[in-house]
Amino acid sequence: MSATTPPSPPQRLAAPPSHSSNKLRNSTPIRSFNRKDFSIRCEFENSQRWTVRCVSGTDPIHIILKPPSIPMASAAVLGSSRKNSKRVCLFYCNEMKDLAERIASQSDAIELRSITWRTFEDGFPNLFISNAHGIRGQHVAFLASFSSPGVIFEQLSVIYALPKLFVSSFTLVLPFFPTGTSERMEDEGVHQIRGFAKKERFYFGDNILPCFESGIPLLLNRLQQLPDSDNISIAFPDDGAWKRFHKQLQHFPMIVCAKVREGDQRIVRIKEGNPAGRHVVIVDDLVQSGGTLTECQKVLAKHGAQKISAYVTHGIFPNRSWQRFSHDKGGSPENGMTYFWITDSCPQTVKEVKDKKPFEVLSLAAPIAAALQI
């Protein structure tokens, strides 16, 4: 900032007052000046150092208060810590305990709160929210798991109860929403909707503000860490996957596959792009049986792909269908995959594939923690 003051006959010239609440100490007064530049180093009570520079080349004298230089990374952390001051009480269902703990580890502003999950003798939920009065006036969030139909019903009672405890706000976190499984990205004016198709966003009532996020940034970060990151191509198993993701992955060479009918069979063919000699990563929103992915894998290998990996946001894998995917240790892309990335949106799958190659879990903890600060 800058301030302008007229030249003054008194011999003492002190540093200008700061807008900060901190008081100056150890400042050095200047008793006279001879129309040359001089500097005063001032130390605040919080140990930050500011430089006061008086430029007296022309009248009036300009006194400039220059803040201390902060490294870019430190400035980002400082700005983030100041901005993200919203404190959130995070409740969670039992299936999401591991993810909830990872989310809480991302920020001191997120406090984990537990729920006692019990049942009556007839099997109906008997749930207890401890210290319910303690969350009055607080920002409250609930991390739900809708990937297992058997636990959805008992969570509904919590979702209905928490907003009625006089909380300041209530946020429902749904990493996987089976009613709108397709992770889409469509233009709507100058804004973009990530997470679901436009029609699904209106599934929610007018008193709910949906915030849609994508797991693709997690994939991008992981691809940058690979030793062959400069030799990666992205493959889409069909036109639908291309429409959902191509804008976020447009800086990669792309391959688009399609299913064509030959007699009574539907065969996967390469519609455009060349996989020869490339590490090809197949990208889709979710996987169930994995049939489409394996067919796509075979045709990519047939056309010369050096390595084949896959990414899906939601690894559903009913009936342990993940077992059909083998690990390619090198040289057999038609039979196995180098990597198979999923997120932890479906906790049961995460437990089953933990430490089993080619599977690797990309955690949603960081983006969820950031979204809770909105």
Image (tube, rainbow, N blue to C red):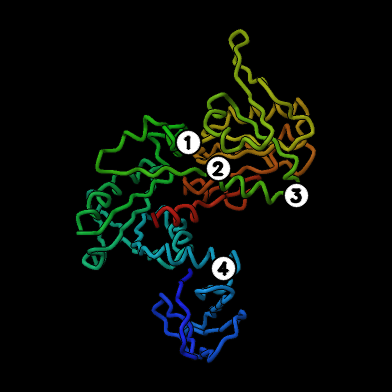
Left or right for 350, reference 167 = right
Q: Position of residue 126 (x, y in %)?
A: 24, 55
- Residue 251, image quadrant: top right
Residue marked by disc 2: 216
Which comes before the other along the chain, label 4 or label 3?
A: 4
Mark 3 is surrounded, within 10 Å at the Cα level, by few (under 14), some (14 to 19) or many (20 or more) other residues, namely few
Q: Which mark is residue 74?
A: 4
Q: Which mark is residue 195?
A: none
Q: How much space separates mark 1 and mark 2, taking CA atoms?
A: 10 Å
Kind of residue sitting beneath label 4: Ser
Viewer-side residue, 287 vs 194:
194
Residue at 58%, 10% in the rendered image: 264
Kind of residue sitting beneath label 3: Pro
Are the residues tagged 4 and 3 within 8 Å (C-beta)?
Answer: no
Kind of residue sitting beneath label 2: Ile
Q: How much space separates mark 3 and mark 1, taking CA atoms?
A: 28 Å
Residue 120 can be seen, yes or no: no
Left or right for 311, reference 8 = right
Q: Nearer the viewer, mark 4 or mark 3?
A: 4
Residue marked by disc 3: 227
Residue marked by disc 1: 183
